[in-house]
Amino acid sequence: MDVLQLGLIPYKEAFEKQLELVEKRIKGEIPDTLLLLEHPAVITLGRSGKRENILNTGKVEIIEVNRGGDVTCHFPGQIVGYPILDLSKRGKDIHKYMRDIEEVLINFLAGYGIIGTRIEGKTGVFAGEDKIASIGVTAKQWTSYHGFAINIKKDISVFETIVPCGLAGIKATSLEILLKKNIAMKDAYEKIAEEFRKVFGII
């Protein structure tokens, strides 16, 4: 598997990169690929998203996207992962795929001593009752794109502009908030890639 760390990159540029890689993966021109990156502040509204879950439209760019799920946001200090995987070799099971991504993130958090959990009926990963990671995926010809986002740095103020994933009453949190200390982003990137390889059995 190729892992590409792209740094801070605008959402639309990353989306175009995904589409390019999806076509190449479908044609067998590249192996399974994981993009890891950060975005400037942006709100994205998925296929089942409701505009009323966006609380403040004046501060942050809003982009409608073709992934599953409701509304979420991205910002520097949040690691975003876009796996471009051939799911035809993995049972063509989107629900299992999302549970596997959750497992990656739960294992990643465990490496920092944080217990990440699932809440039945709510996609993503939670720390206690607070949401730390979101997942929204789609696929073309059983090749995945879009993916996951996990909050690392303590400044998560962008979440004040939305109802995270449309879940009223759910608060967001981050790794630094939970640990009360700074986390090196470089280390976090490497650990996510390592856990992704383990869960998906990709060298």
Image (cartoon, grey):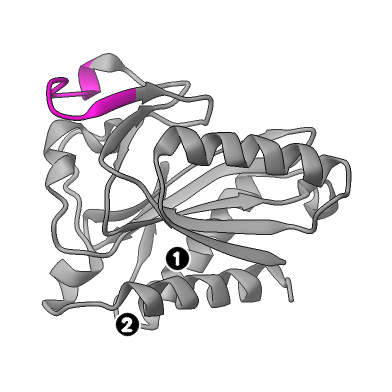
The foreground one among 34 and 46 is 34
Q: Quadrant of the N terminus?
A: bottom right
| Relative image position of residue 183 (x, y in whole percent) | 25, 77
**Residue 90 lies in what quarter of the image?**
bottom right
Judged left or right of residue 203, residue 83 is left
**Count of numbered circles on the image:** 2
| Relative image position of residue 37 (x, y in whole percent) | 44, 56
Q: Vertical placement of 41 versus 153: above or below? A: above
Q: Which residues are magenta?
A: 52-62
Q: Which residue is mark 2?
A: 112
What kind of secondary structure does the magenta stretch mostly adopt? loop
User: How far apart, in angstroms, are the residues tagged by discs 2 and 1?
Assistant: 11 Å
Category of crowding for the residue at label 1, using alpha-carbon neighbours closer than 10 angstroms: few (below 14), some (14–19), many (at least 20): many
Q: Could you tell me if residue 82 is visible in this image?
A: yes
Q: Quadrant of the C terminus?
A: bottom right
Residue that lies at the very extreme toward the right in this rendered image: 28
Q: Which residue is mark 1?
A: 105
| Relative image position of residue 75 (x, y in whole percent) | 27, 47
The three-letter amino acid code for the residue at tag 1 is Leu
